Every structure is written in structure tokens, then in C-alpha cells.
Image (cartoon, helix red, strand yellow):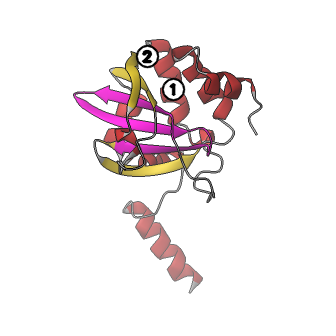
Amino acid sequence: MRALAALLLLLFAAAGCTPTYGSTNRMGILYGGADNLDIVSSPERVQAFRLRPPPADEPVPHYNQWPVVGSPVRVSRDIASRFSNGLTRSSSFPRWEDPKTCEPRPGFMLRFTADDRHVDVVFCFECKILFTYRGSESIWYANFDGSTKSIASLFLQLFPNDPVLVRLAAQDDS
């Protein structure tokens, strides 16, 4: 029986049918596939947005459609590269999908653009959760506990006077 199981496993592996749960697959899930992951990994342009909650009587179904405070900020290549590197590494999400009791109220968004396509990554620093979108399509979410300070520090370079970011960038990542 063991020999049969080993043979079947070998055949499935040779056919490429074995499930993979590595970091690449995790990132593929988070961003909705290889095409979207490529956009975040190698964007032509990245913009940052400061978000505010919509009025209570005008609910907005997707966080990436929340009202924007001010104008978008064009992200320099250096900072965009640092965001891309961090947001496409599985190690940035040590608690991945652990359930949380926090009600998300995201305040920041990055829009990664390549070939006239974009992927939005929306951040709630209160809950330490990010949400991914492709247009109006909600893709997935991940907890970024342990990476809060580094993410906040990058955003602080874009929004230097934001009191939330100043406080977060000074805290320990715990």
C-alpha cells in the first residue's frame, strides 16, 4: 500500500499536480494570480493615497473606493521598489490570515500600475491588515503584524506630517 501511495505521489508530482503552499503561491493568492503579482513586483508607476472613511449614510463597498484626502502622491522609484520588495515577500506577513476582531478603517492605499493595469493595496494600520483589489474586484487580505513599522516608515516619507504615521514609525513592531 505504501508503495502504491509513493508511486501515485511521484506520478502527480511529475504531472505538476502537487499543491504548493510556498511563499510564491501565498503571494499569488494575495494578489489574485501571477499577472497581478507581476504588477506589484515590477510596477511602471506607484501612487500613494490618504483615505478617509465615507459618510455613514453613504457606504462604499470596497476600501479602495473610499474618499481620498488631497491629491495622490507619486512614489519615487526607490520607495516604490522598497514597497514592492516588502509586499511580495511572504515573511512580511507572519500572521497571514489569523482572525482578528478589529473593524478595519483603512487610511492609506498604494496603486501599482503597469501596462495600463493596476492593483490597489489598502492598509489599515489599526488592525494591521491590508486588502488587495484589481479595479472594483476585491482579491484577498493579509495581516502585516511585524512589518507595521517598516511599512509606516515608508508611508511617512510620502506623508511626512501625518500624525498616525509619525506615531507608528516610532513604535516597536510587535
Residue 63 lies, in percent from the top left, at 41, 44
Q: What residue sits right under mark 2 in the picture?
A: 75
Residue 74 lies, in percent from the top left, at 39, 15
Residue at the front extreme of this rendering: 57
Residue 128 inside the magenta-drawn segment: yes
Residue 103 inside the magenta-drawn segment: no
How many labels were placed on the picture?
A: 2
- Residue ID at (49%, 71%): 9
Q: Mostly what secondary structure, the magenta segment?
A: strand
Say if residue 165 shows up in the picture: yes
In the image, what residue type sits under mark 2?
Answer: Val
Q: Quadrant of the N terminus?
A: bottom right
Q: CA distance from mark 2 to mark 1?
A: 10 Å
SS assignment at label 1: helix
- Residue ID at (63%, 58%): 101
Look at the picture and state if 84 lies above or below 101: above
**How crowded is the residue under tag 1: few (<14 C-alpha within 10 Å), some, or many (20+)?**
many
Look at the picture and state if 2 lies above or below 76: below
Q: What residue sits right under mark 1 in the picture?
A: 83
Instruction: From the viewer's side, name the closer residue of 114 and 167.
Output: 167
Going from N to C along the chain, the mark reached first, 2 or 1, is 2
Look at the picture and state if 77 lies above or below 18: above
Say if residue 29 shows up in the picture: no
Residue 152 lies, in percent from the top left, at 61, 27
Residue 154's disc number: none
SS assignment at label 2: loop
Q: Are marks 2 and 1 in contact (CB under 8 Å)?
A: yes
Q: Quadrant of the C terminus?
A: top right
In the image, what residue type sits under mark 1?
Answer: Phe
What range of the chain is rendered magenta?
A: 106-133
Q: Is residue 100 left or right of residue 105?
A: right
